[in-house]
């Protein structure tokens, strides 16, 4: 990394919405390169180009029922059978039929498909019955025409998208490379095992943050989590320099203020970093930051400074890291859902208040939770997200407010 002077100029605290827009923009400007991946390896990635069909969908007429493909008026003489996976011969004579299975290709010359349960056999072995007026087969291009765009670049790949891509004939997808993340835990007072005591507290963020980062689509290995890093400037600089060699994003916990053992700011200055955001007018978690560094290889890396208090760190994660990662993945800025407050929520003066809430799945209302101090995790453990109370306001019962969902697994999202 390039070196700089011993300090970097800090902009004034940013408004919460402004900070999110700012970090999303720098992330999008540094969007990660496209890579080709087999379908089975694309879950959780982001499309780097639109998903289009290689053929019509379906590619050929397929029976939607088990029955008889008939030509002309009945009764019909049976001349064969068509199963899925075969290309049948045409029906060339009126009064003939072939037995057909669901999903099988409809023979050329077919005038109707008669459901098996609505058919009968005559004493001399002919098939009889009255086909329904509506065609009982899927027509080519009924779902999509060849070359049609099904999903835009920036769409998240999930199991449904993988199945759709396979049905279109794709074996691979061009997706954005997933960001590689690292985590540095600062603080000599932290314990990594056993109960807290004798003035030392247990590190709660080292074990928890990697799981949340993975839910945002990051790759982070156990060896990418380092700490506690010694409370010295040389140790901070060395740890950051090492982490930045392999990571697109380095998250740090603690040291975002200017106390006697807070070395993050001078360490960033020593590495030649530029602030994107340095403090945000939000409570809790205002001393959060995001810095940008350009390596000698020309690659852009980011450092997200999360406060040391656990809930404040998660506020920084959902406020800055989430939109940054959306930009890096080439996705659109996350759109926040809304919920109706079931109880009042206090404002925080000229700061945005992110208030932990849980969602009632029956009424869809948001309820503030207890135990929500910056250093507490109990409230966080039962919450679904943060209600956004804008500066200069308070949340009243019945207010529709934005909610920042916690980075849960997609199937667990309640919003």
Image: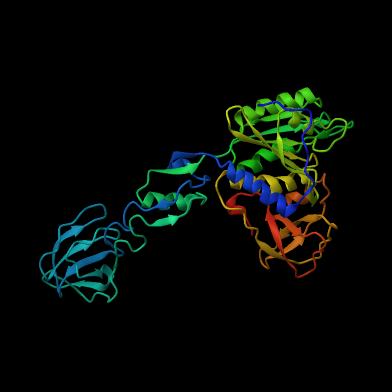
Quadrant of res 398:
bottom right
Query: From what the image shows, is residue 14 above or below residue 396?
Result: above
Q: If the image is split into quadrants, where does the N terminus sit?
A: top right
| Position of residue 193 in the picture relative to residue 74 (left or right) | right
The total number of labels drawn is 0
* Front residue (pair 153, 118): 153
Which residue of the protein is positioned furthest toward the right in this rendering?
Answer: 198
Residue 244 in the figure: left or right of residue 258: left
Q: Is residue 13 visible?
A: yes
Residue 144: quarter of image? bottom left
Q: Position of residue 43 (x, y in %)?
A: 50, 45
Question: Is 374 left, or right, of 401 in this rendering?
Answer: right
Q: Give the percent coordinates (x, y) of residue 131.
A: 24, 74
Q: Is residue 26 left or right of residue 289?
A: left
Expressed as whole percent of the image width and height from the top left, the position of residue 380 reads 75, 50
Colouring scheme, one of rainbow, by chain, secondary structure, one colour: rainbow
Residue plotted at (18% across, 56% down): 88
Q: Could you tell me if residue 383 is visible in this image?
A: no
**Image coordinates for residue 273, horizontal then vertical, percent:** 70, 33
Identify which residue, 211 or 391, lies in the foreground: 391
Front position in the image: 33 or 82? 33
Q: Quarter of the image containing the C terminus?
A: bottom right
Which quadrant holds residue 125? Answer: bottom left
Give the residue drawn at x 69%, y 48%. 318
């Amino acid at each position: 990394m390039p070196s700089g002077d011993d300090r970097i100029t800090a902009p004034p605290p940013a408004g919460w919405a402004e900070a999110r827009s700012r970090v999303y923009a720098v992330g999008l400007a540094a969007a990660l390169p496209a890579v080709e991946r087999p379908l089975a390896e694309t879950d959780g990635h982001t499309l780097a180009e639109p998903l289009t069909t290689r053929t019509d969908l379906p590619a050929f007429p397929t029976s939607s029922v088990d029955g008889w493909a008939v030509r002309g008026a009945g009764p019909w003489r049976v001349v064969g059978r068509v199963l899925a996976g075969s290309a049948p011969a045409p029906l060339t004579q009126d009064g003939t039929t072939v037995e057909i299975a669901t999903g099988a290709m409809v023979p050329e010359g077919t005038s109707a498909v008669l459901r098996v349960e609505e058919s009968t056999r005559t004493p001399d072995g002919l098939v009889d019955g009255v086909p329904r007026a509506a065609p009982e087969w899927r027509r080519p291009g009924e779902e999509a025409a060849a070359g049609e765009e099904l999903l835009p670049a920036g769409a998240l790949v999930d199991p449904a998208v993988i199945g759709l891509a396979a049905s279109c004939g794709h074996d691979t997808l061009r997706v954005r490379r997933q960001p590689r993340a690292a985590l540095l835990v600062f603080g000599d007072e932290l314990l990594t095992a056993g109960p807290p005591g004798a003035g030392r507290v247990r590190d709660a963020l080292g074990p928890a943050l990697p799981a949340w980062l993975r839910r945002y689509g990051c790759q982070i290995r156990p060896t990418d989590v380092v700490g506690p890093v010694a409370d010295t400037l040389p140790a901070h600089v060395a740890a950051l320099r090492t982490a930045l060699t392999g990571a697109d994003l380095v998250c740090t916990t603690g040291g975002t203020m200017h106390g006697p053992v807070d070395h993050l700011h001078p360490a960033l200055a020593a590495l030649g970093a530029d602030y994107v955001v340095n403090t945000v007018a939000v409570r809790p978690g205002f001393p959060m930051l995001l810095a940008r560094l350009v390596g000698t290889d020309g690659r852009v890396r980011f450092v997200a400074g999360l406060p040391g208090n656990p809930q404040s760190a998660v506020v920084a994660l959902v406020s800055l890291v989430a939109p940054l990662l959306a930009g890096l993945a080439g996705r659109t800025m996350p759109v926040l859902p809304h919920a109706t407050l079931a109880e009042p929520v206090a404002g925080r003066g000229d700061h945005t208040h992110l208030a932990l809430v849980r969602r009632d799945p029956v009424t869809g209302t948001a309820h503030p939770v207890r135990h929500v101090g910056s250093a507490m995790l109990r409230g966080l453990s039962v919450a679904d997200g943060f209600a956004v109370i804008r500066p200069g306001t308070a949340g009243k019962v019945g207010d529709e407010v934005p909610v920042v969902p916690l980075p849960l697994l997609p199937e667990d999202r309640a919003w």
